[in-house]
Amino acid sequence: MGEIDPAFIQATDQRPKLNPTNPVADEIPIIDLSVLSSPDETRKVVSEIGHACKSWGFFQVINHGVPLELARKIEEVAKTFFELPAEEKKKVKRDMVNALGYHDGENTKNVRDWKEVFDFLVEDETLVPASPEPDDKELRKLTNQWPQYPPEFREVCQEYARAVEKLAYKLLGLIALGLDQPENRFNDYFRDQQTSMIRFNHYPPCPFPHLALGVGRHKDAGALTVLAQDDVGGLEVKRKSDGEWIPVTPTPNAYIINVGDIVQVWSNDKYESVEHRVVVNSEKERFSVPFFFFPAHHVMVKPLEELLSDENPAKYREYNWGKFYATRNRSDFKKQEVENIQIHHFRLPE
Ligand SMILES: O=C(O)CCC(=O)C(=O)O
Ligand SMILES: [Fe+2]
């Protein structure tokens, strides 16, 4: 079995309980979107989603409109890509210049994740700040790197991106309705120059599942995440009521949705971006595909004025999404000595 590289070892209090003595019932709500054509049913779905966002920050959706055939194809191209020899994958490796493509050395909270990933942008050319420095107004264009194999890779990725983007807008609308806002309240932040990204995660079997994590605990920084997972399991969500780590049992053909930091700020903490992590196992590899719904770089994120009052004053000062993203990317890329940028850094004193 050999020795584990110490870079992967989680601090004692972060290590997973692999065989919990009291297995927890899966409580994360499953919401059926097939009924959205009827106004009464839509109201019900809006309220179910609102509840799920408040109590869990997570829910699953079924009958979501993403063609099953496309979901199957995306899993297949992702698997085929990760099976390529390392030298082939390294041809599209991310580097200091291009942050997109393949890599296997990511740190979450300064511990290395047991995974390899491939990242691509939903818009093939995406503008982002050139640096995290607040006074540097320069922008740069990010572009995708596409592997040559499998040959259908790019086309399948782009078709999948459009289908999941549609679902992401639908969900964003339902969340807006749940906050008593018009359904299209948030759309303009994305319509032009969204910075959304799709990631293929591959978690190889790990001989040290009690010491390492596939992804360390974190919150997603964007507005929403729309995640496909296979049938292996490993995602765990921190339950708000007691801080226990609750596994999200795979549901066939479902997407897992979680609200990110941006929705937390827009909703002024009504909905919270909840911590989650991925546990690995010694036998099976696992694949997952998150779609990170990110607004345009120029969007200033702040609590919605419409929700604020004397009783509900703003809990955050506004921040620029592009600079947040640039700062976060810098610190995920290299191991750093300090905590990387987090949403609580923008919290106003009570
Ligand atoms: O693989 C998963 O289930 C979740 C991955 C995740 O949380 C992420 O990539 O942000
Ligand atoms: Fe995540």
Image (spheres, rainbow, N blue to C red):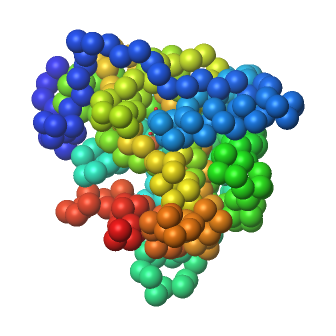
Q: Where residue 17 sits in the image (x, y, percent)?
A: 23, 23
Ligand 2 located in image quadrant: top left
Residue 199's place in the image compared with 252, above or below, is below
Q: Quadrant of residue 190?
A: bottom right
Return the residue nearer the eye: 108 or 313.
313
Q: Quadrant of residue 16?
A: top left
Q: What residue appears at the point 35 percent right and 68 percent down from the top-left corner?
A: 350
State the residue lying farthest toward the bottom: 135
Q: What residue appears at the point 63 percent right and 32 percent down from the top-left corner?
A: 48
Left or right, residue 144 beside residue 329: right
Left or right, residue 236 beside residue 19: right
Number of numbered labels in the structure image: 0
Q: Can residue 76 be seen here?
A: no
Q: Can residue 283 be seen here?
A: yes
Quarter of the figure that contains the N terminus: top left
Q: Where residue 96 sits in the image (x, y, percent)?
A: 42, 65
Residue 67's place in the image compared with 121, above or below, is above
Q: Where residue 11 sits in the image (x, y, percent)?
A: 15, 41
Q: What residue appears at the point 27 percent right and 44 percent down from the top-left corner?
A: 112
Left or right, residue 336 beside residue 218: left
Q: What residue appears at the point 58 percent right and 28 percent down from the top-left corner?
A: 60
Q: Where residue 205 sits in the image (x, y, percent)?
A: 33, 22
Residue 238's place in the image compared with 34, above or below, is below
Return the residue nearer the eye: 309 or 347.
309
State the residue lying farthest toward the front: 311
Return the residue nearer the eye: 57 or 62.
57
Residue 118's place in the image compared with 123, above or below, is above
